Image (tube, rainbow, N blue to C red):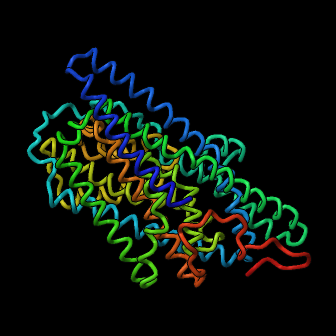
Amino acid sequence: MAKKLTRFILFALVLGIVAGWATNAAIDDGTPAAAAQLKAIAGYFSIVTALFLRLIKMIIAPLVFSTLVVGIAHMGDTAALGRVGIRSLAWFIFASLISLSLGLAIVTLLHPGVGIGLPLPDVTAASGLDKAAFSLKDFISHLVPASIVEAMATNEILPIVIFSIFFGVAITAVGDRARPLVRGIEALVQVMLQVTNYVMRAAPFAVFAAVASAIVEEGPKVLFSLGRFVGSFYLGIAILWAILIGIAFLAQGRRAKDLIRYIRDPILLAFSTASSEAAYPRTLEALERFGVPPRIASFVLPLGYSFNLDGSMMYMTFASIFIAQAYGIHLGFGQEITMLLVLMITSKGMAGVPRASLVVIAATLSMFRIPEAGLLLILAVDHFLDMARSATNVVGNAVAAVLVAGWEGKLDPERSPDIEPLRAPSHMPPLAPGAEPEA
């Protein structure tokens, strides 16, 4: 099933490019009427993608809750939970610094924005993005959900994680009396994995529609007009992948070379749909196949979706300095380091914010008196950049889960990446009568 899905997604990706390009070439004559018609056609294509992403959002909340609660219940003690949490956050901070610094270094060395020579608008000129959507104060105050039902209804992953941690720790403390509840949630995990299998069968159609929609409306020329910017960013992404996988190789030896093979499907899905969230269920399954225990993967992965979006963080420094270069604004080394540290903090509030990277960039630019209207320059190619960001987020979080599992000494033997998704993890059995939770 895994190999077939990969082939179908690749075929849909190529077909989407061809269909989008052909449609754009047949209709686009440079007139406003043609542009409106292409936008309408792209809107029809995007219906399929929107439906698929809604299907994904439908399963995210119960999947995160059930896998995380069962993982904590089988972790056995709060000391192990705290140790995994501290190690995860320590790696997230380190990976964030790597991603942000690499974006800063690449854009500074290659100067993709130099020579564009945009006329300098008023610093208060707006980009059209709602900066009020991001607030560090709101982010911190919403860590703890006022209602878990509301958090699940809006797919706010971090509040769901906080509630799930409390719930899982409470189950561990209650002990034997919570056994029926643990068995019920374990059953929910298996049901949600089965639902995931059903949803993923629609992935090739969503990939085709997403790519076709972007090419129909913008045409291939948009990639060439900002080709240096796009090419420089993709080069940075390739270097970031090499660094992350290299670190995994140093930590796990030759075994780490198989990691990409195990997560190829979620990477391809995230890249094609430009959505890290769409790849979450498959990433969880791929990590289990690689040998990361579900109790660790189900804890690290949701946290990573809030704190470890490596591709998005690299993009924020890259795009911010690119816009400054395009306007001919010089930033000193001290200002660049200050920007890096600001983005290091504000990026942790990206989860759940629409077009989160752009929103955080817009909020940061004004702090350094860079016109946020410069974001309009990159909006045309943002979808293609988001594809790379999303795929990189998957790689970063997969590496994080593998590293934490390795540090815990809990990596299990590998299973074939081509088998069907796991139904009942043998190393995560239901609590037997009178038994203590697994240590």
Q: Foreground residue, 432 or 198? A: 198
On-image quarter of the N terminus = bottom right
Compared across the picture, whether 131 is left or right of 109 comes to right
Compared across the picture, whether 97 is left or right of 59 comes to left
Q: Give the residue at x 41% y 70%.
A: 94
On-image quarter of the C terminus = bottom right
Q: Foreground residue, 368 or 290? A: 290
Q: Give the residue at x 33% y 72%.
A: 243
**Where residue 425 sits: x, y (%)?**
70, 70
**Where residue 6 sits: x, y (%)?**
46, 56
Relative vertical location of residue 398 with respect to residue 250 in this rendering, above or below: above
Relative vertical location of residue 140 with respect to residue 296 in this rendering, above or below: above
For residue 154, which quarter of the picture? top right
Q: Give the residue at x 68% y 54%.
A: 194
**Where residue 124 sits: x, y (%)?**
27, 32
Q: Is residue 306 visible?
A: no
For residue 428, which quarter of the picture? bottom right
Relative vertical location of residue 365 with respect to residue 173 in this rendering, above or below: above
Q: Is residue 327 visible?
A: yes
Q: Residue furthest top?
A: 33
Compared across the picture, whether 159 is left or right of 129 comes to right
For residue 40, which quarter of the picture? top left
Q: Give the residue at x 79% y 77%.
A: 437
Compared across the picture, whether 98 is left or right of 61 comes to left
